[in-house]
Image (cartoon, grey):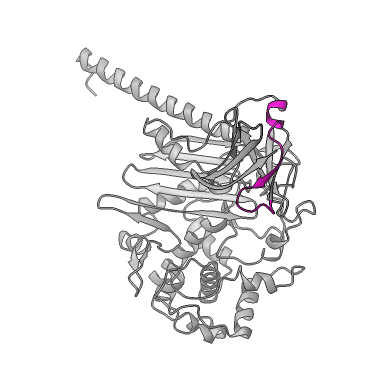
Amino acid sequence: MNFKNPILTALIFLASNICFGQNKNIEKRLDSLFRSLSEQNQFSGSVLISEKGKIIYKSGKGFANEKTKERNNSKTIFELASCSKQFIGVGIVILQRDGKINYTDDMTDYIPELANFKGVKIYDLLRHTSGIPEFLGQFAGDWNNKKIATNQDVIDYYSHRKDTLEFKPTSTHQYCNTNYVFLATIIERISNQSIQDYLSTTIFKPLSMNRTFIYNRRENPQRIKNYAFGYTWIKNSFEKATADDSKIGDSTAYYLDGIVGNAKINSSVEDLYKWMNALKNNTLLTQQEFDEVMEITQTTDNQEVSYGFGFEVRKSEKNISYGHTGSWDGYITFMHHNSANDRTILVLNNFRNGVYPYETINAIIDNKPTTNEFAKKVDMEEGEIKKYTGDYIDGQDTSEKHRITYLDGYLIYNTDKENWDMRFFPTSINTFQAIRQGGVDGVMTFTKLNDGTMKLELTQYGQVIGNGIRK
């Protein structure tokens, strides 16, 4: 650089300082967002955000372990839930590259026990156009919940039942976890390796993803440093517990713990950043392979399939964005990359009601007004909140009551027929925002009528879904 021109030098110095100041302001606003969400019981986890190849924010909020009070950070390991599928998809690509499989092969070439599913191609499993039943439905309902199921158990189940396909392969796009269970088994049978060893050899180790692995926590428990347990609330309490804790009593995550492919890969936001960089930079896949993984196709019924090999995909003339979401066992996960602004957003929650504020993150980075995607909690006296408690007679069905109770500064919503255990925090003197999973927008509004009665109105995304009167 030529420093002989003092004016040019001053301008360069000024520009660099402005850029630095803008980045610090973005980082401050992002941290304020996630701190606020954490304080409002809407986020517990790790986040990493990058722009044009540079990390602009990474942090951890909340507890990885509620018992020891160990905090989340950018190296904390989380279950990825359905974000696991992309690794299985790319694992299939590597097998195809090595000449060990073809995308057009029939799945029964590798899982002959499932002759009743003949006609389903590897492509169909990858893109969810197979017609195979969802194992989280009838299989999960029929399984002995005292025993941990495996992929082979799923195969044996459908082999014995001889179920027919729900639709002709390639005719319909229908998301189905069973597809990726079968893909994981196909990888194991062709490679003669466990799915963990295969993915470690072909993906995790080459990319130095040293904190990424398959983990069946109930089937094969281990002591893992800096590991986040997935939590949910105990009913009528702000105490958190794992799903299979006796205080929660949900054994689903226990007895499905041995099934892999659809979920069970664990990782950190720092490792996932390596993965996302490898994808966009063609470190692992060639450009041709990447294009095929991210291809948007059509069914034979002319339905667009905006799902690649384990990725949800969106495309325009000048942009491609891809990623996935996940929800399982107290974990909420979000991975996304947008090529137009070279922006990567990674959010891992270890709390069932955790959120990933995608729109607000983008507004902050783009220096735009935030969208009220997530309302802020206001301070209210206990008595001011409690005055809205009681039973509200439903305006559409007088046989049902909306039951509003108070708990630690929040209103709890149930009915006299269903224990919903939905928690709402105050956002104004008479409006309360739901703490919700996946960002579903719910609001309770209370209005005192002229006759002295109190009206409750429930809205979701601004649409009225229920109301009631308390006399």
When asked about the image quadrant of residue 349, the answer is top right
Q: Quadrant of the C terminus?
A: top right
- In the current view of this chain or complex, which residue is farthest to the front? 451
255 on left or right of 207 = right
Q: Nearer the viewer, residue 395 or 157?
A: 395
- Rendered location of residue 363, percent (x, y): 40, 35
Q: Nearer the viewer, residue 391 or 110?
A: 391
- Rendered location of residue 35, percent (x, y): 57, 31
- In the image, residue 329 sits, relative to residue 125, either above or below, namely above
Say which residue appears at 73% left-offset and 61% top-offset: 251
Q: Nearer the viewer, residue 191 or 295?
A: 295
Say which residue appears at 75% left-offset and 53% top-offset: 248
Q: Quadrant of the N terminus?
A: top left
- In the current view of this chain or complex, which residue is farthest to the right? 246
Q: Nearer the viewer, residue 112 or 322?
A: 322
Q: Does residue 294 appear anywhere in the picture? A: yes
Which segment did they paint magenta?
383-400
Q: Does residue 421 appear anywhere in the picture? A: no
In the image, is residue 144 part of the stretch drawn in magenta? no
Say which residue appears at 48% left-offset and 38% top-offset: 373
**Total of numbered circles in the picture?**
0
- Rendered location of residue 32, percent (x, y): 52, 28
- In the image, residue 64 sits, relative to residue 209, either above or below, namely above
- In the current view of this chain or complex, which residue is farthest to the left? 5
In the image, is residue 395 part of the stretch drawn in magenta? yes
433 on left or right of 256 = left
434 on left or right of 234 = left
